[in-house]
Amino acid sequence: MNISPSVTTELSTMMNKRNQPLSTGTIAMQIAKGKWQDTDLFEFAERKNPKRAFLFVSKILGKHIPVSPRKMRSAYQDLAQQIPENIPEPILFIGMAETAVGLAGGIYEEARKKYPNSLLLTTTRHPIDSELLCEFKEEHSHATDHLIYIPDGENKISFCTKFRTLILIDDESTTGRTFHNLISSLFHAGLRGISQIFTVTLTDWSGDVLSHQHDMPITSLALMRGQWEWHPDPSAPLPTMPNVNVTEKGAAMLSSRQDWGRRGMAAYDGTGWLNRYSASPGERILVLGTGEFLYPPFLLAEQLEQQGAEVRFSSTTRSPIAEGLAIQSSLAFTDNYGLNIPNYCYNVAHQTFDRIIVCTETRDCDLDPAFLAALANVATTVEVAVYD
């Protein structure tokens, strides 16, 4: 089909172009214009991962770049507002570990205001003592395996047949492959009765690929859409990835309080835990989640910000990223789950804070002392908030 010059010009005016050179190649992008600018949403970094050497580093996710909880909440609200009215209930929301667990919690709580007959589940890489619903692969990832568990007290057959709408949440969709794997695994495990699916992401680069792969209406909701092409440099050496692809129980015991996603969350009530902490107006505070433990720490950061403190939220991760571009500094240490794998904290070591609160679903003694010592170099006070 031929496209007339006037149509080509119109399409061009609706898109922004951006090229990003990296040491292993160049990303060429076309980005749809909208409310959010690409510079508001992400920057680039280089992954220590030969399967995909680049990374869109979100500036509003609160994972690799410390960000104001107020800005994060704005993104949650914008995405939840895109969910249409009058979709069939009950609704099953699923958030993707580890990066999008907090994002899923925030979008879910906003969406639940108009859809109270809903449930949130999050995928995990930490096996728990519950019935496994399914597992699937995130093939490009540094940690490929995901597990999803049936909520405590639920019968598998009734659980798999009671939902009518499925909403899947991740920080981005680059090719749509991970969503495809998740959808296929859920239906293979027995999920029935779903009449439509929504994918919700901060950025979506996958086009309508999912709608061609499944015989069901699938709608993409995102703050930004576009297309990208990767132009590799054949002479560049591939990066070496540390071994962080571990999906097993670690030596550290998880908190018995699993009320935010892994075992299902209908409505979160963390008032007692949150009210242990307070802030002074103007106090510069960094709240850090750890691994998959993200949503309760985010709510703590938001509470302290509402009390007048200057708060930033971020978290530790097992994702190995090279310094440079969006990553101005990094700390490496041993994980707090007892898996003996490297973890990282990005864009903190070059900053200064009055106080850092490290939030953990394991015991305080499971945190690497070297990590806490490194944080003490950038903050007057470092405290540990154990989720119990």
Image: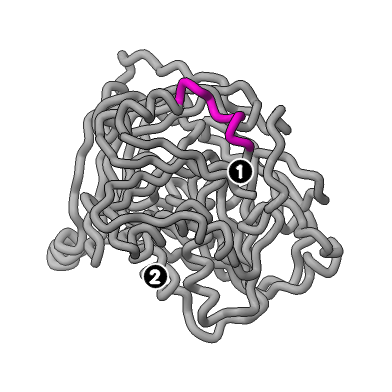
Residue shown at the point (55%, 29%) measured from the top left: 367
Give the amino acid at mark 1: Glu
Give the amino acid at mark 2: Gln
Residue 333 at x, y percent in the picture: 48, 22
Q: Residue farthest to the bottom?
A: 86
Residue shown at the point (43%, 43%) measured from the top left: 357
- In this orientation, does residue 231 appear? no
Residue ID for mark 1: 361
* Residue 111 vertical placement versus 23 (above, below): below
Residue ID for mark 2: 77
Write down the quadrant of residue 22 in the picture. top left
* Residue 239 vertical placement versus 70 (above, below): above
Examine the structure image and report whether residue 4 is included in the region drawn in magenta: no
Q: Which residues are magenta?
A: 363-371
Residue shown at the point (45%, 39%) measured from the top left: 383
Q: Secondary structure at mark 1?
A: loop
Q: Earlier in the sequence, mark 2 or mark 1?
A: 2
Closer to the camera in the image, 276 or 366: 276
Magenta: main secondary structure equals: helix
Query: Marks 2 and 1: which is nearer the front?
Result: 1
Mark 2 neighbour class, 10 Å CA radius: few under 14, some 14 to 19, many 20 or more: some
